Image (cartoon, grey):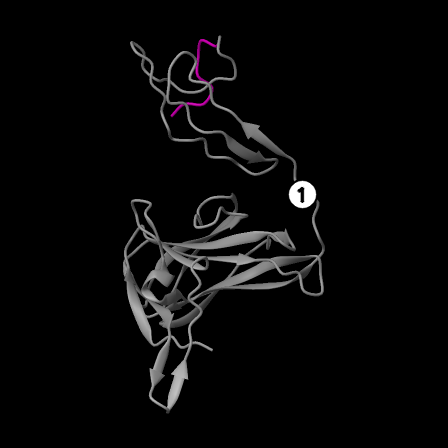
């Protein structure tokens, strides 16, 4: 087991994240019904987002499935229900991302041993829980021998057919520095890359669907 015997501060704009894999024990899929987080501070405000199949070590990557705002009035372990619980198939991974709107303090798990009297062991695997600073820097809690107390609650569900995906390619149209390609899943909004290409003697106006277009369809 583990014991939340320590806590760490969080800042406004900072994110606390956990990555899980769908085991599908007894079923081919699971629905994400709720998430939980341990809070030392009272009167906290945040949003919880769930991303499907994030890249290893990048909890904010993958496809955004849902975002739910929440506020708290007490210290302790807080559970946030997820309306229209998203369903993921066995083998999929997902990240739970809590974006703090105000500064406060949260519980963490850390191994503890008091001689021969009592001891706790925290699961500090490198690919489990992360802190993402407001500037986007990602740090694994395992680097400090700790684990963020962010949980996910699921139940068995029927498997869902994978949605079609498409590759969005960028062309700098005579310039340079075009963004890397992005994967778009049908029915799920995609935020276009913020990378801006450059071309001597020109200002970037946005993206179009044809290199001969005279007006940008998607503007920065």
The residue positioned 29% from the left and 9% from the top of the image is 201
Instruction: State which region is magenta.
Output: 213-220
Residue 100 visible in the displayed image:
no
- Please tell me which residue lies in front, 182 or 208: 182
**In the rendered view, would you say 59 is above or below 215?**
below
Residue 193 drawn at (x, y percent): 42, 31
The residue positioned 60% from the left and 31% from the top of the image is 166
**In the rendered view, would you say 137 is above or below 108?**
above
Residue where numbered disc 1 is placed: 162
In magenta stretch: residue 138: no
Residue 205 is drawn in which quadrant? Answer: top left
- Please tell me which residue lies in front, 35 or 7: 7
**In the rendered view, would you say 114 is above or below 205?**
below
The residue positioned 65% from the left and 40% from the top of the image is 163
Residue 143 drawn at (x, y percent): 34, 61
Element type at mark 1: loop
Residue 148 is drawn in which quadrant? Answer: bottom left
- Please tell me which residue lies in front, 89 or 153: 89
Residue 212 drawn at (x, y percent): 49, 8
Compared across the picture, whether 125 is left or right of 145 comes to right
């Amino acid at each position: 087991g583990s014991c939340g015997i320590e806590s760490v501060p969080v800042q406004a704009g900072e994110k606390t994240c956990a990555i899980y894999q769908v085991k599908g024990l007894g079923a081919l899929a699971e629905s994400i019904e709720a998430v939980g987080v341990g809070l030392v501070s009272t009167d906290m405000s945040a949003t919880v987002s769930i991303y499907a199949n994030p890249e290893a070590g990048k909890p904010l990557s993958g496809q955004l499935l849902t975002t739910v705002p929440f506020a708290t009035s007490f210290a302790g372990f807080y559970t946030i229900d997820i309306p229209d619980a998203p369903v993921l198939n066995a083998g999929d991974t997902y990240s739970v991302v809590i974006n703090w709107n105000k500064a406060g303090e949260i519980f963490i798990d850390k191994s503890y041993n008091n001689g021969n009297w009592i001891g706790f062991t925290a699961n500090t695997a490198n690919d489990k829980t992360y802190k993402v600073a407001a500037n986007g820097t990602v740090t694994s809690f395992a680097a400090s021998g700790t684990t963020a107390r962010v949980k996910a609650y699921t139940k068995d569900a029927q498997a869902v057919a994978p949605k079609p995906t498409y590759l969005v390619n960028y062309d700098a149209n005579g310039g340079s520095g075009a963004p890397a390609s992005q994967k778009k899943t049908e029915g799920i909004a995609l935020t276009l890359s913020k990378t801006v290409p450059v071309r001597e003697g020109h200002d970037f106006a946005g993206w179009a669907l044809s290199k001969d277009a005279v007006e940008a369809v998607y503007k920065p």
